[in-house]
Amino acid sequence: MLLHDNKSLASLESGSWEYKAFHDFRSIILSPDKAFPCTLGVAGFGADQLRFNFIKHDLESDTAANQLAAALQSFVPNARSFGKNTSLVVFFRENRDLGVEAYECIFWNILNKLHNLDSRPWPKEIPHEADHNNWEFSFAGEPIFVVCNTPSHKARMSRYAGNFMITFQPRWVFDGVIGKDAPNADRIKSEIRRRLSIFDAVPISPDLGVFGDEENREWKQYFLSDDNQVRATGCPFNHSRRGQAPKVLNTGLHNLTQVINSLLPPTGSVEVQIDTPFRIHTQHKHAVDETLHIIKGSLDFHLQGETISCGVGDRLLLPAETLHSSVAGEEGCTYVIATRLVFSDRFELQVSESAHV
């Protein structure tokens, strides 16, 4: 069974990991000592509107991602019939203390895999860039607020779970309740923050905000650290660019260390490449997205029947499967390559409209 409700959960074998994971969750959300901060989640649980799924496979396996996608494909079309306060709560078998940073990397890898398995188009009303205040993760055509809980959260107990856990809450659950123009939004927001101040042993995260507000970035709320240190990098979510055109960002950034830091993924590496003067890369394409950031010299790219000249500080975003070739300038070219599209970071990047291919 992909989706469980309270009735089917009652039949779980008492010694199983699924039984323990669910009852640990139940004891937290219904704790008589400290009110759980998410009032909508508590209401949904009490009204049997939540749905549950259990994944026993390794967190980073394709099998786990496929099962998660199948659960969401079952949940999303039927969500409204479950009730106004519904969510899909997914428990994974993993219950080790791997560390908050390790779990954050795992979480974003899962979300990226999930996105790549989504066969439905991205909703037209949701921007593709996670740095936009109206961005929200989406699946099966539905915008969804995502929350991750881990066994490694010790101070921020509102993000603790005995097993690695991801909750998917449709954006429409918040309509008229929390957000812009909701009549009781301020009161509900104050109550949630009051509960957080009691529930957690760390001050309320500065990343918590209201969807749509100019300064709010939803992705930052998906995975909260166990402290309140400022994030040094941009969103690890990599939106699929299938069929989209390359573009150039004029960043003005050319310090090697800063460029590397701006392009590094949450876990992994980037490549620094040097082309000698007038070196030619004949026409080819890559199976993955690429970002090339020039720190010295120049490079002429030939793609889609046009030539685009890039110099120091330019960042070329090259979607997967884009046929291209290049020629280095008379001084050669030094550039950093990341195997993902990096639109922005802590540096302000200005898109040059005239540089669009």
Image (spheres, rainbow, N blue to C red):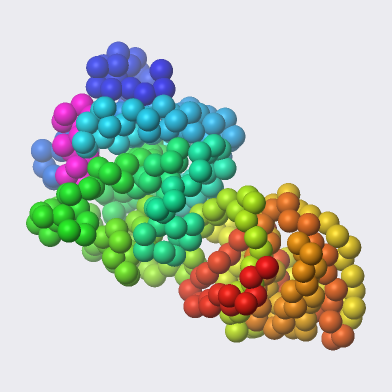
Residue 103 in view here: no
- Nearest the viewer among 61 and 65 is 65
Residue 316 in the image, given as x and y percentages of width and height: 67, 69
Residue 252 in view here: yes
Residue pictured at 78% horizontal, 72% vertical: 307
Residue pictured at 16% horizontal, 30% vertical: 46
Q: Quadrant of residue 127?
A: bottom left
Q: Check residue 328 for magenta coloring.
A: no
Q: How many marks?
A: 0
Residue 57 appears left or right of 16: right
Q: Look at the image and tell me in which quarter the N terminus lies.
A: top left
Q: Quadrant of residue 133?
A: bottom left
Task: Say above or below: 328 vs 45.
Answer: below
Residue 300 in the image, given as x and y percentages of width and height: 79, 75
Task: Say above or below: 167 vs 189.
Answer: above
Magenta extent: 37-50
Residue pictured at 28% horizontal, 44% vertical: 172
Q: Residue furthest front?
A: 305
Residue 324 appears left or right of 118: right
Residue 256 in the image, given as x and y percentages of width and height: 67, 79
Residue 54 appears left or right of 207: right
Residue 221 in the image, given as x and y percentages of width and height: 34, 56
Q: Check residue 49 for magenta coloring.
A: yes
Residue 149 appears left or right of 65: left
Q: Look at the image and tell me in which quarter the C terminus lies.
A: bottom right
Task: Say above or below: 57 vs 338.
Answer: above
